Image (cartoon, coloured by chain):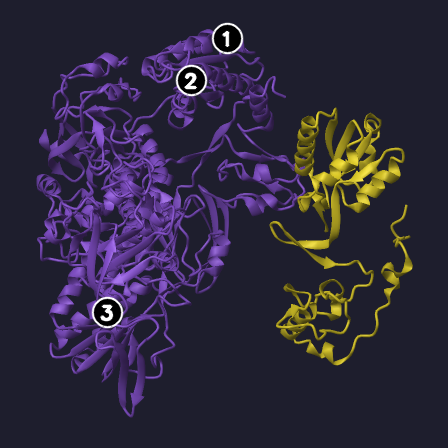
């Protein structure tokens, strides 16, 4: 029995951890045709990102961008959220695991709980609120945060006094004090670990007095202070006296880059950017002038457009002081004294009103235990052990990892890895895709075109949320008097499952063809009611919602009479609009089951291979004769991967895969169509014959090039070379290199300057890698690195430390005093200003190595063919810097590798897998739903004025062969911008027609004008 | 294309305040493209006027329409049946359209709703710029495709003048010197020899010199 079971793969995946990475992995996999069990130990998913106020570098509100994901996960038919649950063990092997879970009791039945919140309001017991980082209190019966998913409350029995009040007030009868822990098991084919990470506890540093000085807070506490939903409602206040501080300091590397206090030697990779962000946002919150100072060692703004953010912060007056603060002393009643040595070596003291400790990541004891139970190996810092070439694969086959368990990283990198882990799982389980998933069968839609409007109005009490303020029976009876209304009723909870059943019955019985629900917000509940309509064979657009809770009972609590009158107004408006609602057609079109990958470097090859392993046909287009791209010039990575061996194997695998067609010397010359149905024209060498490729998805992996310097005697003297040149030299001529006595390296050549303000991310580690290699060749060789900030982020810090311990010398130079290279007879000389001595130092060198910038490949023509935007440096723009790092703004076009931004090989591979995951999920659907609430042009009045073309944020409208505007329903996002801008008023938007909006307003203003 | 901009609403209110029933007539041609007088502008203007007169407690009925082009009689004809329902018309067409409507409906007061500005181009959304002054005798062939009549503030035929500085015109640092543009373009085209010979004075008969102009083409006349 055991044998037959083992050989059968299971088309389900367990994702452990419901933070942003876990959610992304779950969504990718569920869309790709796998059933996902999303397990989280806390009562709600969301992770650390849900606690953040804003996110860098876009300053988007974290909650605003994560909550649509929360809702999507919560509503996905093929994601089973299992909260309050821990994984006890994992047996079996890749393709067929048995996971053992412990489901901790929630004491509130999620099936019944409607999240009305009465239980929490009645609860007399309070505890510190961990979500707000212990800065305020919450009830024992609580929801982690207002947008929490699953939407339901939980009882913290450790502080619950068992008074029974919540049970009494819960009209849904969801409270169950007798809930018990349960042990469950489930079969899954693969496991993705995304448990996230803890943050460093700074109480270990006695000199920081974190426990004793209330105005010393951690960065995560500061995020909550800034957050509108935080303990101070977004008012910038210090904890001691709730006064607005006028001077705040950030101390970087707290718990990172140090080993003196049992802290961590690695760099936490995100703290520099979040500290800058917090300083900038704090300035925005302040009512007067706010003085912000960031004390740092190296400013590690290495990500895409991060340097621009850093520069802007400097312009906005954020002070950056290069010094590591030893201690925080109390000053006066609650102020804080910092002493430091400035750039000139002078001792300075400054008093601040608040100090933020930029705490780093730390793998918690629980996560270490979890890793043991799951049988995956951790590295010396307790992050999951992975390889450069397989960045999301753990030591246990079939178990993948993403997010901060893999290493310290920011949100976009976590999201990429999450999709990458999904791609790896999908490649493993491809043959059992769609075997465990659920499908919703819907009846055919009833034709209502000949029917008079028959409106059914359902008024919700929402427990007592609405009913306690608004006179719901009066609103119900009022609705009865409105035109076209054929049925009214009120419900305790209109959203509850049993109400859905009775609603469906009454819709059929009374031939209702328009439904109005007066309840809470469409943001959380519209889809639910639309589903009920679909289940009885009505078009989902025949639905209208009146928000008499958030916009009425909650805001007019003190005036029930007026609240009732307003509820009637809102219902009247909705009923008026509902009568004019039209069914909108959505049709399915076929998705071409083929992918196209442009660029055959390390990213393109990985993307193509994974997509093929997922079972899809893929065409790889490479402009050069040989595959491999820039990686062909790399010999080893900093962690010792033999790049050429790896590339040879990879290329061999790609070339022999039956699903892959490789076109080299191939140039993209034409591109048309839309998501699901692209046609690309390619000229293929050497004969330059033309090929037309039909495909459903496109992946851009066009790579980057090394900048050819025009300074420091480069190309004038053979001894001056770039890091890439040095790599080649070491590979071919190591004996010659071993004879060198002194090598000088200059960093930031062609980066972080006016022409190219961004950091090239990879050059610091490139220099350290080669410096260590040179030291190995000849331990007596003097290796000197001239740098501006050593950006050895994340676990790269280990190599930086190794380099320092091996005697490699690091000298910092400032941008306004760059080093000079000169020739003295046959000799090569480098001059630079030493920051400590504050005087010029001159030395001879056998080789001068330039850490030259990574520049975008020339993709101007390709970008214009594919209509893809690029940033000022020529790197392609992702759809969203934080949460959609591999999607382009045009749908079904994905992005990976250095075409997106400079990055390490392991990061390129993770992003390539992510692009393949997105592409695979898109193709797996096989059909595409188009239409619905989209913009439609009436060509009669179109003046071909181009206003729609110019104003569409998605670049969808085009002037067609008939010289009128045309909007592809498959691409239209339904935002309505063109509709409101069209000077001919000849574009209309389904579900937002002028008459519908007028009816809405006229109903409101009835009797007023 | 002819570029226009919406008149300030106060001016339009002043035009129509003494009437009781007014038709706002847009034009689907040039003024639609420059977002001054198309259907949307008609609706926006009509709504604003209704709000104003309601607030003023004045009885005023305002209807909306838009014609394919107001510079063609056939399209103006579409108003024939209903023109008598109105006390006055506000035309959002260019000056030509307003006049043609006035010619056709002689007994109705016709008011302009836009200020017609120039013949020009859409440089970007919301930015329109003059390119042609309809002088009637095009000299673009010899000026690198850049018109000194419309682009030089002095309409000089032999420029630039002494007021040209760093490529800008002395009237404003935001105005390019037309002759500087011509020079740069000719240089790119390798046609700088144009500058060697002074240009003869232009025959302005084809411009406004000869009074209102008319084109009569026997080859296409019916």
Residue located 50% across and 9% down the image: A478
Disc 1 designates what residue?
A480
Looking at the picture, does residue B105 appear above or below residue A392? above
Chain shaded purple: A
Q: Nearer the viewer, residue A398 or A275?
A: A275
* Mark 1: secondary structure: helix
Of mark 1 and mark 3, the one earlier in the sequence is 1
What is the spatial separation of the Cα atoms under label 1 and label 3, in whole angstroms? Answer: 77 Å
Q: Position of residue A268 (x, y in %)?
A: 21, 53
Q: Which mark is residue A43?
A: none
Q: Residues within 10 Å of mark 3 (few under 14, many from 20)?
A: many
Judged by depth in the image, the label closer to the viewer, 1 or 2, is 2
Residue located 23% across and 84% down the image: A843
Looking at the picture, does residue A320 appear above or below residue A289? below
Judged by depth in the image, the label closer to the viewer, 1 or 3, is 1
User: Which quadrant holds the C terminus of chain A?
Assistant: top right
Is residue A663 shown to the viewer in this render? Answer: no
* Mark 2: secondary structure: loop
Badge count: 3
What is the spatial separation of the Cα atoms under label 1 and label 2, in whole angstroms? Answer: 24 Å
* Mark 3: secondary structure: helix
Disc 2 designates what residue?
A559
Q: Position of residue A336 (x, y in %)?
A: 21, 52
Q: Residues within 10 Å of mark 2 (few under 14, many from 20)?
A: few
What is the spatial separation of the Cα atoms under label 3 and label 2, in whole angstroms? Answer: 69 Å
Chain letter of disc 1? A
Chain letter of disc 2? A
Disc 3 designates what residue?
A767
Q: Nearer the viewer, residue A642 or A502?
A: A502
């Amino acid at each position: 029995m055991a044998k037959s079971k083992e050989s059968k793969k299971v088309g389900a995946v367990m994702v452990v951890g419901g933070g942003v990475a876990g959610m992304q992995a779950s969504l990718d996999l569920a869309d790709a045709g796998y059933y996902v069990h999303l397990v989280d130990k806390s009562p709600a998913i969301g992770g650390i990102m849900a606690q953040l106020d804003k996110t860098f570098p876009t300053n988007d509100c974290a909650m605003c961008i994560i909550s649509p994901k929360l809702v999507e996960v919560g509503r996905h038919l093929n994601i089973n959220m299992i909260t309050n649950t821990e994984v006890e063990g994992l047996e079996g092997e890749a393709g067929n695991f048995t996971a053992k879970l412990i489901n901790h009791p929630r004491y509130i039945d999620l099936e019944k709980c409607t999240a009305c919140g009465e239980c929490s309001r009645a609860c007399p017991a309070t505890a510190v609120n961990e979500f707000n980082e212990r800065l305020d209190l919450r009830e024992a019966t609580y929801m982690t945060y207002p947008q929490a998913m699953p939407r339901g409350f939980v009882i913290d029995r450790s502080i619950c006094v068992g008074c029974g009040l919540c049970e009494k007030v819960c009209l849904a009868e969801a409270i169950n004090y007798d809930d018990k822990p349960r042990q469950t098991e489930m079969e899954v084919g693969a496991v993705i670990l995304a448990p996230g990470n803890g943050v460093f506890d700074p109480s270990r540093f006695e000199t920081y007095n974190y426990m004793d000085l209330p105005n010393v807070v951690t960065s995560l506490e500061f995020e909550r202070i800034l957050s509108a939903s935080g303990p101070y409602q977004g008012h910038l206040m210090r904890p001691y006296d709730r006064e607005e501080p006028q001077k705040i300091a950030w101390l970087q590397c707290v718990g990172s880059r140090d080993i003196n206090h049992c802290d961590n030697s690695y760099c936490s990779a995100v703290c520099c950017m979040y500290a800058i962000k917090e300083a900038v946002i704090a300035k925005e919150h302040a009512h007067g002038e706010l003085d912000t100072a960031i004390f740092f060692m190296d400013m590690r703004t290495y990500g895409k457009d991060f340097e621009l953010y850093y520069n802007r912060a400097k312009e906005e007056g954020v002070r950056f002081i290069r010094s590591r603060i030893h201690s925080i002393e109390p000053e006066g009643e609650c102020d804080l004294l910092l002493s430091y040595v400035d750039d000139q070596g002078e001792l300075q003291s400054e008093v601040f009103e608040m100090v933020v400790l930029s705490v780093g990541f730390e793998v918690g004891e629980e996560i270490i235990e979890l890793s043991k139970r799951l049988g995956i190996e951790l590295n010396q810092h307790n992050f999951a052990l992975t390889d450069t070439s397989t960045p999301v694969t753990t030591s246990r086959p079939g178990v993948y990892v993403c997010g901060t368990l893999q290493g310290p990283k920011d949100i976009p990198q976590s999201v990429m890895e999450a999709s990458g882990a999904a791609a790896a799982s999908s490649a493993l389980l491809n043959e059992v895709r769609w075997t465990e998933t659920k499908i919703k069968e819907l009846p055919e839609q009833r034709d209502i075109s000949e029917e008079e409007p028959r409106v059914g109005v359902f008024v919700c009490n929402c427990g007592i949320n609405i009913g306690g303020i608004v006179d719901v029976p009066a609103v119900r009876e009022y609705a009865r008097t409105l035109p076209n209304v054929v049925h009214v009723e009120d419900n305790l909870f209109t959203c509850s499952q049993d109400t859905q059943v009775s609603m469906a019955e009454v819709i059929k019985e009374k031939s209702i063809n328009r439904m109005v629900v007066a309840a809470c917000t469409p943001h959380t509940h519209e889809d639910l009611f639309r589903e009920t309509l679909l289940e009885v064979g009505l078009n989902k657009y025949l639905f209208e919602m009146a928000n008499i809770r958030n916009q009425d009972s909650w805001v007019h609590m003190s005036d029930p009479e007026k609240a009732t009158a307003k509820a009637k107004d809102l219902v009247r408006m909705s009923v008026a609009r509902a009568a004019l609602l039209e069914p909108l057609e959505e049709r399915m079109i076929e998705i071409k089951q083929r992918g196209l990958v442009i660029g055959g470097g390390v990213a393109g090859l990985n993307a193509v291979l994974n997509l093929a392993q997922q079972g899809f046909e893929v065409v790889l287009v490479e402009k050069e004769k040989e595959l491999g791209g820039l990686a062909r010039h790399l010999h080893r990575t900093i962690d010792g991967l033999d790049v050429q061996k790896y590339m040879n194997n990879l290329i061999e695998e790609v070339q022999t895969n039956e699903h892959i067609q490789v076109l080299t010397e191939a140039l993209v010359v034409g591109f048309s169509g839309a998501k699901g149905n692209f046609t690309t024209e390619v000229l293929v060498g050497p004969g330059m014959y033309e090929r037309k490729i039909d495909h459903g998805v496109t992946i851009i992996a066009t790579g980057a090039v090394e900048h050819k310097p025009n300074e420091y005697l480069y190309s004038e003297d053979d001894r001056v070379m770039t890091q890439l040149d040095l790599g080649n030299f070491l590979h071919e001529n190591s004996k010659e290199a071993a004879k060198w006595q002194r090598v000088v390296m200059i960093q930031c050549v062609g980066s972080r300057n006016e022409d190219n303000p961004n950091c090239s991310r990879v050059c610091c580690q490139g220099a350290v890698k080669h410096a260590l290699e040179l030291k190995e060749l000849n331990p007596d060789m003097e290796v000197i690195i001239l740098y501006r900030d050593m950006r050895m982020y994340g676990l790269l810090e280990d190599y930086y430390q190794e380099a320092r311990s091996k005697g490699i010398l690091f000298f910092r130079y400032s941008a306004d005093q760059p080093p000079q290279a000169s020739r003295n007879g046959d000799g090569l000389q480098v001059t630079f200003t030493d920051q400590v001595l504050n005087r010029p130092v001159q030395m001879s060198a056998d080789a001068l190595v330039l850490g030259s910038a990574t520049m975008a490949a020339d993709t101007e023509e390709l970008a214009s063919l594919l209509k893809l935007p690029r940033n000022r440096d020529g790197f392609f723009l992702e759809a969203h810097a934080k949460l959609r790092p591999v999607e382009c703004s045009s749908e079904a076009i994905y992005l990976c590798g250095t075409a997106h931004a400079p990055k390490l090989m392991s990061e390129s591979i993770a992003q390539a897998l992510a692009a393949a995951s997105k592409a695979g999920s898109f193709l797996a659907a096989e059909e595409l739903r188009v239409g619905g609430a989209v913009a439609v042009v009436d060509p009669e009045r179109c003046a071909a004025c181009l206003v729609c073309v110019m104003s569409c944020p998605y670049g969808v409208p085009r002037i067609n062969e008939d010289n009128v505007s045309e909007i592809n329903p498959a691409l239209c996002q339904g935002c309505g911008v063109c509709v409101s801008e069209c000077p001919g008023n000849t574009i209309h938007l389904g579900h937002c027609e002028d008459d519908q909006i007028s009816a809405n307003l006229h109903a409101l203003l009835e009797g007023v004008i | 294309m002819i570029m226009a901009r919406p008149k300030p609403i106060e001016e339009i209110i002043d035009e129509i305040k003494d009437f009781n029933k007014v038709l706002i007539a847009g034009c689907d041609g040039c003024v639609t493209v420059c977002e001054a007088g198309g259907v949307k502008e008609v609706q926006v203007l009509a709504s604003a006027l209704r709000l104003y007169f309601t607030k003023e407690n004045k009885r005023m009925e305002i209807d909306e329409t838009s014609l394919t082009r107001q510079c063609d009689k056939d399209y103006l004809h579409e108003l024939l049946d209903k023109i008598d329902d109105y006390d006055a018309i506000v035309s959002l067409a260019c000056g030509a359209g307003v006049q043609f409507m006035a010619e056709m409906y002689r007994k109705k007061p016709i008011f302009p709703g836009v200020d017609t500005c120039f013949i020009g181009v859409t440089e970007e959304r919301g930015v329109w710029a003059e390119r042609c002054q309809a002088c009637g005798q095009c000299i673009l062939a010899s000026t690198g495709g850049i018109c000194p009549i419309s682009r030089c503030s002095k309409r000089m035929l032999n420029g630039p003048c002494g007021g040209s500085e760093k490529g800008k015109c002395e009237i404003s640092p935001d105005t390019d010197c037309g002759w500087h543009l011509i020079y740069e373009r000719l240089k790119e085209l390798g046609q700088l020899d144009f500058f060697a010979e002074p240009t003869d004075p232009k025959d302005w008969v084809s411009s406004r010199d000869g009074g209102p102009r008319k084109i009569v083409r026997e080859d296409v006349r019916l």
